[in-house]
Image (cartoon, grey):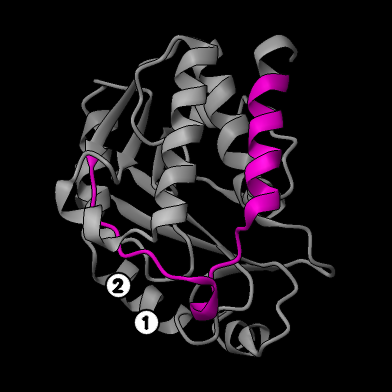
Amino acid sequence: MKKVSIIIPVFNEKDTILLLLEKVIEANFSGLEKEIILVDDCSTDGTTKILENLKSKYTILFHEKNQGKGAAIRTAIKEATGDYIVIQDADLEYLPDDYNKLLPLLINDEADVVYGSRFKNKENSKNFILKNKIANKFLTILTNILYGAEITDMETCYKAFKSSFIKNIKIKANRFDFEPEITAKILKQKVRLKEVPISYAGRGHEEGKKINWKDGIHAILTLIKYRFID
């Protein structure tokens, strides 16, 4: 049986991590064997203690200092042994069941990379915070202009890869600039990238959302940077 490595970067998610893991376990993931890899990015809210108690069930790695989402993903990719790799945030904005929409395109060799698009599902329109929606739309438009692409959701968390492909990409991003960096490098390689609609329930900063306007500026600079180098 083929395997999917489910990468979960975690930072200060004590209120959601256990429920998220339940949902990951319950989800089918297209019938693939699951390898769950969590990377605790030096949480300070009690998340680390929760994960310490789960080391017998999952592969759990710990950063000694906070480095960011991109760094956590890099750490996990090195340990992943699955035929496919997917990324799952530790909050509850995305539903693990939706990976059943992404993975078949990889399994059937119809794509090398699949993005779950929040904007292709019209039911999500009411679930976005307006300023976040505008920022996401702008960054996606900028991506399409710079790279001659036609994607609808560059910043989506839900990205699924053939393991052989993602492991051959050198990722440098430490923080949320992982999304524009990986997208830029995918588009420059002209691989088969497809999108499918997914569900989304956005949360605000008061609920624990960590990305901010500074990350938006970094995303713009990252898109421009990798258009011309690397």
In this view, 167 is above or below 130: above
Identify the amino acid type marked 2. Answer: Lys
How far is the residue under mark 2 from the one under mark 1? 6 Å
x 62%, y 52%: residue: 76
Task: Give residue 28's position: percent from left, percent from top.
Answer: 21, 59
Quadrant of res 102: top left
- Quadrant location, the N terminus: top left
For the residues bearing labels 2 and 1, Cβ distance under 8 angstroms: yes
Task: Give residue 108's position: percent from left, percent from top.
Answer: 21, 26
Farthest residue to the left: give it: 123
In this view, 61 is above or below 206: above
Secondary element at tag 1 = helix
x 75%, y 12%: residue: 229
In this view, 80 is above or below 111: below
Q: On the rendered structure, is 25 left or right of 101?
A: right
Asked whether residue 83 appears in the rendered view, the answer is: no
Q: Identify the residue position indicated by label 2 in the image.
A: 23
- Quadrant location, the C terminus: top right
Q: Identify the residue position indicated by label 1 in the image.
A: 19
Examine the structure image and report whether residue 224 is included in the region drawn in magenta.
yes
Identify the amino acid type marked 1. Answer: Leu
x 44%, y 57%: residue: 88
In this view, 137 is above or below 191: below
Q: What crowding class fits label 2: few (fewer than 14 Cα within 10 Å), some (14-19), or many (20 or more)?
A: some
Examine the structure image and report whether residue 38 is included in the region drawn in magenta.
no
Residue nearest the viewer, comparing 160 with 203: 203
The magenta stretch is 197-225
Q: On the rendered structure, is 7 left or right of 119?
A: right
Total marks shown come to 2
